[in-house]
Amino acid sequence: MTGGEQGGGLDWREGVIPVSRRFDDPYFSLNDGLAETRHVFLVGNGLPGRLRDGFHIAELGFGTGLNLLALLLAMPPGITVHYTSFEAYPLTADEMARALDHFPEARAVAGPLLDQWQTGARRLTLPGIAAEVIVGDARQMLAGWPGRADAWFLDGFSPAKNPELWGDDLMAEVACHTAPGGTFATYTAAGHVRRALSAAGFAVERRPGHGRKRHMTAGWLA
C-alpha cells in the first residue's frame, strides 16, 4: 500500500524520490525504479510476451502509477488488457507527477493518466489498457472483488515496514483471485512472504533481483 496526504504525507529524498511518512519507505527503488519495475513486474510475469486481448493484471499498491506506465510503454498494438490496482492511500495527481518527473520515459506518456486522476476518476482509459484503481484496504477490498488476474504485481511497501500487505490471509486471497496458470512477481524475497505464497498454492521461485538487490520472488499458481 502507499501513502499520500491521506496516508500520512510524503517526504522527498533528494527532491525527487517520494518517501511515505506512514511507512518510512520510498515508493520506488533508489537505483532506477523504472528499470526495476520492468525487471521485477514485467519480466517476472513473462510480460509483454503473455499479453493477449482480455489479459488481466492485478496489483497491490498503485503508488505513483509507475508500474502501469511501464506496462503502457510495453504494450503490443491491437489488444486491450485489464488492470486492477488496490490502493489504500492514493497520492494526488500533483504528487504523482512530481515523482514521475524522475523518469522522463514514463512521464512522457503519463499525461492521460494524470489528467483523469486529477478529476477524481478511478476508472482510467489508456491506449490498450482499461484500468481501475480500487481505493481501500486490500485486506477488505480484495475479498469482494469479482475478478481473477492472469498476473499479479505485488508491490506493497517493504514487508518489514508494511507487514499487513504481506500476511498469510491476503496472500491466500491473491491466490483465490488468480486464474489457472496465473503468475505473480514481487521485489521482496522475504522468507515469510515466500512461505505465505507457497501455502496459498503458488509454485514459488527466488530469482535474481535488480541492481543491488540480490533476490526477488516470482511464481505461478500450481
Image (tube, rainbow, N blue to C red):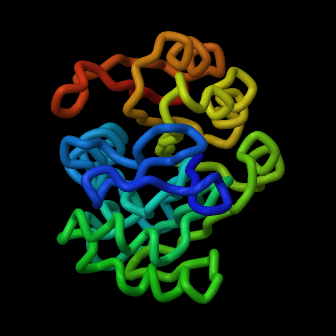
Q: Is residue 166 above or below residue 93?
A: above
- Along the horizontal axis of the image, is 21 left or right of 95? right
Q: Identify the residue at horizontal 47%, vertical 29% (top origin).
A: 220
- Along the horizontal axis of the image, is 79 left or right of 57? left
Between residue 50 and residue 185, name the one nearer to us: 185
Q: Identify the residue at horizontal 47%, vertical 88% (top origin).
A: 115
Residue 176: x and y in percent read 71, 36
Q: Is residue 116 above or below residue 158?
A: below
Where's the C terminus, which quadrant? top right
Q: How many numbered discs?
A: 0
Q: Identify the residue at horizontal 44%, vertical 53% (top origin).
A: 11
Q: Is residue 122 above or below residue 10?
A: below
Residue 36: x and y in percent read 25, 43
Residue 100: x and y in percent read 32, 67
- Along the horizontal axis of the image, is 90 left or right of 31? right
Q: Identify the residue at horizontal 31%, vertical 39% (top origin).
A: 40
Residue 99: x and y in percent read 35, 64
Between residue 110 and residue 17, name the one nearer to us: 17
- Along the horizontal axis of the image, is 48 left or right of 211? right
